[in-house]
Image (spheres, rainbow, N blue to C red):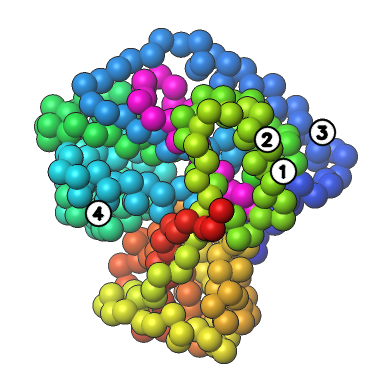
Amino acid sequence: MSWQSELRERIAAGEPLPFPLAALLSAGVPLQRMGMWWRLRGPRERVDAHVISFGNITAGGTGKTPAVIERVERELAAGRIVAVLTRGYGSRTPATSPLVLRGDEAADRWDLVGDEPALIARRCPGVVIARSSDRVAAARLAIERFACDTLILDDGYQYVRLERDENVAVINAGNAFGSGYLLPRGILREPVSALARATHVILTHCDQAKDLEATLEVLRKHCPNAPVRKTRHTPERLWRVTDGAAVPLEHLRGETVTAVCAVGNPTGFRATLESLGATVAELRAFRDHAEIPPEAFRAAGLVITTEKDAVRLATAEANVLALRIALRDVDA
């Protein structure tokens, strides 16, 4: 793991930092607060479609993509014409001009739309992917070209310029608010009080929560009228990256593996593999959305990566498997 990844892990865990580094990071907090203050006071725009925003008040690692996939599948099954609005994190091209593609076109073009949108397109045939830093323009283009009547604003909690009908806050119950500091000193994009804007809350990784009741108490205080859904990320299946062939989850039991990922919560990925009975000999973690070098996937024995990272791989050895995750409710 690189020193940058280690620092991000320490910040996310709320571990003490050396005074000069802590002071330097704290100096950047006012800029973060000023930027959001300005956006909240800007004009809002509404488009002729039902807009559902999925986002979070922390940086990375909430497990938002399975929630988005689940909702897209539900809306498509109901006969709606759905577009996912994305900024295109992880793409190779600037997101300045709006780009709108059918799902079958976007599924293999992570370089244009980003890794998560490409994964959504693969998992949800029939969806439209609309990518731009100006997601109002992307929304209008999706409506104009494909007559979309339902828009999923991905990672949109802070993109307040586009009016939404539903504002879903996704929170990792395993590390809900970090140390309580704002970026870059902590992991909060906004103060916890910003949860007052949520119409719904999805708590993910409830099975990894150290004090779920404390998190629920915070939600009762800041968004008392928002329904709270408690979920966990459940491994669904493995598939071989070379040919897409399904591999039973039981194949991991008792195996020593190398884990490779570029996600917001790499330790959560390790924990998931260990819960399936694997021994993780090495975790090769990269910055979220990073393009992982091919040599990182070379190792003896099984190499396990995330489904999001697998969409970037044009080729891979036969020992490289991707893990598919689904969102499941937990008992009350």
In the rendered view of the protein, which quadrant contains the N terminus? bottom right
Quadrant in which residue 19 is drawn:
top right
Height in image: 316 above or below 92?
below
Task: Please name the amino acid that badge 4 sits on.
Answer: Cys
Query: Which numbered marker is on residue 124?
Result: 4
The tag earlier along the polypeptide, 4 or 2, is 4
Of marks 4 and 1, the one in the foreground = 1
Q: Residues within 10 Å of mark 3 (few under 14, many from 20)?
A: few
The tag earlier along the polypeptide, 1 or 3, is 3
Tell me, yes or no, whether the two marked residues, 4 and 1, touch with CB atoms within 8 Å. Answer: no
Q: Which residue is mark 3?
A: 23
Task: Please name the amino acid that badge 2 sits on.
Answer: Val
Frontmost residue, 207 versus 309: 207
Q: Residue at x 46, y 48 (%)?
A: 64
Please say whether residue 110 is visible from this viewpoint. no
- Residue 34 x %, y %: 62, 17
Q: Which residue is mark 2?
A: 218
Dot 2 falls on a residue whose secondary structure is: helix
Of marks 3 and 2, the one in the foreground = 2
Q: Which residue is mark 1?
A: 214
Of marks 3 and 4, the one in the foreground = 4
